[in-house]
Every structure is written in C-alpha cells, then in structure tokens.
C-alpha cells in the first residue's frame, strides 16, 4: 500500500536510511523536512516499510530528493510504483517538470529513471561527499 509519509514513520525510515545509504539522513533532518511546506513523501508499507520517495515541490516543479527500497524488497517494482504514484500526485498539484540527481556509478537507478522517461540534462561535479559526480535528470509531465 502506498501512502503519504507520516511522523510515526520516522523511526522505520531512519532505519532504512542506514540500510541503503553510505551517508544516511539523520532522524532530526528527516523530521525537520517533514515540517517544511514544500516537503512531499510517499512510502510503500504493508507490515513494514518497503521503500519511500521524498521530494520537494515548489510551484510547478518537483525535485526527487531521495528514493530508497529495503534490500530485501528490491527488484519487486517498489521504486517504480513509488515514482509512478509520486508523478500522479505531482500532476494533481500542478507540477510540470521533475528533476533528480543520481550517482554516475548507480547503474540500476539510472536505468530505472530512464525507463520512466527521465533524460540526462547535466552533471554536478563532486556532488556526493565531494567525490562522486551526479547526473542531473529531467522529466516533463
């Protein structure tokens, strides 16, 4: 079941951050993001959270800030379903353009985003930890 992120999900999301990322978001940062008026978060949860997507929506643009899927649920369309659900809600909110950054080394994520219609439009040098470049990807809704 995909639903909007709620405050009570913070602990589980923090745990997934630690499972999925070399530099996880701190729980305090997640909590402050949740309070921001531009924040947008969806998660896939049945008995446990399988994955989530966080985005920032400003006027007619959205930036997908984070996509995470627990390792044991990968390759089960969780990220695809989350991103498609996010796009539907973006359209309801009048979003026309969506951006994201992805590590140049993250082939699996790049393939997913391309499959969903995102195109590479730029590079942010040393974006990740001051070491690895990011591809900037764009999709018009």
Image: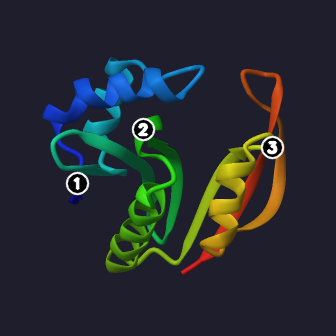
Q: Position of residue 58 (x, y in %)?
A: 45, 60
Q: CA distance from mark 1 to mark 2?
A: 22 Å
Residue tagged 3: 104
The answer to whether 72 is drawn above or below residue 3 in the figure is above
Q: Earlier in the sequence, mark 1 or mark 2?
A: 1
Which mark, by number, is residue 72? Answer: 2
Tell me the colour scheme of the image.
rainbow
Label 3 element class: loop
Label 1 element class: strand
The answer to whether 102 is drawn above or below residue 140 in the figure is above
Q: Residues within 10 Å of mark 2 (few under 14, many from 20)?
A: few
State left or right for residue 33 relative to residue 20: left
Which mark, by number, is residue 4? Answer: 1
Q: CA distance from mark 2 to mark 3?
A: 24 Å
Contact? badges 2 and 3 (CB < 8 Å): no
Label 2 element class: helix
Q: Position of residue 62 (x, y in %)?
A: 50, 61
The answer to whether 88 is drawn above or below residue 134 in the figure is below
Q: CA distance from mark 3 to mark 1?
A: 29 Å
Q: Position of residue 91 (x, y in %)?
A: 39, 79
Residue 3 visible: yes
Contact? badges 3 and 1 (CB < 8 Å): no
To which quarter of the image does residue 78 belong? Answer: bottom left
State left or right for residue 86 relative to residue 20: left
């Amino acid at each position: 079941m995909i639903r909007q992120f709620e405050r009570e999900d913070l602990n589980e999301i923090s745990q997934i951050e630690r499972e999925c990322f070399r530099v996880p978001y701190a729980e305090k940062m997640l909590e402050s993001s949740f309070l921001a008026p531009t924040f947008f978060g969806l998660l896939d949860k049945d008995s446990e959270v399988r994955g989530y997507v966080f985005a920032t929506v400003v006027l007619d643009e959205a930036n997908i800030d984070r996509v995470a899927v627990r390792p044991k649920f990968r390759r089960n369309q969780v990220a695809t379903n989350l991103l498609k659900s996010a796009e539907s809600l973006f359209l309801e909110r009048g979003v026309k353009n969506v951006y994201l950054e992805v590590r140049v080394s993250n082939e699996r994520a790049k393939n997913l985003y391309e499959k969903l219609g995102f195109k590479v439009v730029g590079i942010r040098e040393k974006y990740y930890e001051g070491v690895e470049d990011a591809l900037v990807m764009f999709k018009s809704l």
